[in-house]
Amino acid sequence: MNAQPVKKEVLFTNSFRYILAANFLLFFAFYLIMPILPFYLTEEFGAGRSLLGVILSCYTVAALCIRPFSGYLLDMFSRKPLYMLAYFAFTAIFGGYMLAGTLGLFIALRVFHGFAFGMVTVAGNTIVIDIMPSSRRGEGLGYYGLANNIAMSFGPMIGLFMHQLYSYEVIFTMALVFGMLGLTMAGMVKTPHRDPVRREPLSLDRFFLLKGLPAGVSLLLLSIPYGITTTYVAMYAQEIGLGVSPGLYFTLMAVGLAVSRLFSGRQVDKGRITAVISLGMCLACVSFFALSECEDLAGWNPGVASAAFLTIALLQGVAFGTMFPAFNTLFVNLAPNSQRGTATSTYLTSWDVGIGIGLMVGAWIAQAFGGFSHAYLLGGVLTVISTLYFWLYVGPHFNRNKLR
């Protein structure tokens, strides 16, 4: 008798589609304003480069502070109400930006926005794992992240385009509208029933996945140059006189992220987690060192520098798109099911710490050493360190301690 083919469990349920849409709209609103904020702060409030890094990092620091508690709350209480509450707060603050008449009020709103973002992203990542079949987790996380990448493809480009034609109030209003649409989609997601969780004494491992800390260090080192890139690459292009729209950088980076996520998710489901991460790390090393050389290339031949700049964007997207689903799955596979929220928050907290450091040191290095190319050179060095640490310690540690 011929063996019957194994039927794949259904991934694209209605709830999965709704949460993909909600995730896309959340990040589209986020990316719409992200590249214009440095210009907004300098043009409206006269903030200098060194102050820019401090102000922009408030958002990430706030998200970082709330995420460990988010994971604990999501593991202890009903996840959907927490998700909806955080999504609502995240959306409402876009309207608050239009009312911020002073730099102090803007910073306060930015901090609260970071709290909401930290909570809603942990909740979304945890819920999407709950509603997808475990046999297709890597693939599902790839699609979930793809929603971010599509948002990244269009959000910054449209934001920069609108910056040339419209007022900041119009851009903030558009972010508010897309956030409201996302909130509607989030409300349509049906989450599975969870039995009440026994209240355990508070301890460090209720807030951080201790077995995931080595991987967290590796991820943190990778996210520092990523944070420098996503926040300051438009200023870098302007600084070295490239004749291309910085929005194209985000578009090509998002294309690389999208294509590689689909490939890497399937490889992760086949158990090749550490191999996939290693490949992405090697590509990231090349991309950051190459990005630091664009300044010298621009002095020699601006056309060649522009072509290299856009090629690097695609390569960088492939590098991180390859790693994201694998790292996410790595953290989840180190945790029991009752600590999925904690695993997700540890993963995202590690990422946020690096992004926050990148926001702060990127502008400082540019001011202290005369340009952003030095910041990207540092990024290349940090990526090499992360890669070696992953090969020598994180990979073997994961293979010894993984639960699935």
Image (cartoon, grey):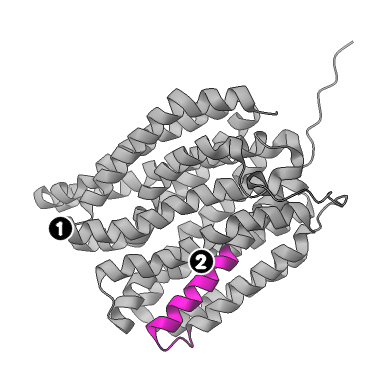
Q: Determine the residue positioned at 34% across, 77% down.
A: 41
Overall secondary structure of the magenta section: helix
- Callout 2: 10 Å neighbours few (<14), some, many (20+)? many
| Residue 371 horizontal side relative to residue 336, left or right | left
Q: Position of residue 60 (x, y in %)?
A: 47, 61
- Callout 1: 10 Å neighbours few (<14), some, many (20+)? few
Q: Earlier in the sequence, mark 1 or mark 2?
A: 2
Q: Determine the residue positioned at 48% across, 58% down.
A: 152
Q: Position of residue 258 (x, y in %)?
A: 52, 46
Which residue is under mark 2? Answer: 30
Q: Determine the residue positioned at 48% across, 45% down.
A: 257
Q: CA distance from mark 1 to mark 2?
A: 29 Å
Q: Nearer the viewer, residue 291 or 367?
A: 367
Regarding mark 1 in the picture, which secondary structure is present there? loop
For residue 217, above or below residue 202: above
Which residue is under mark 1? Answer: 370
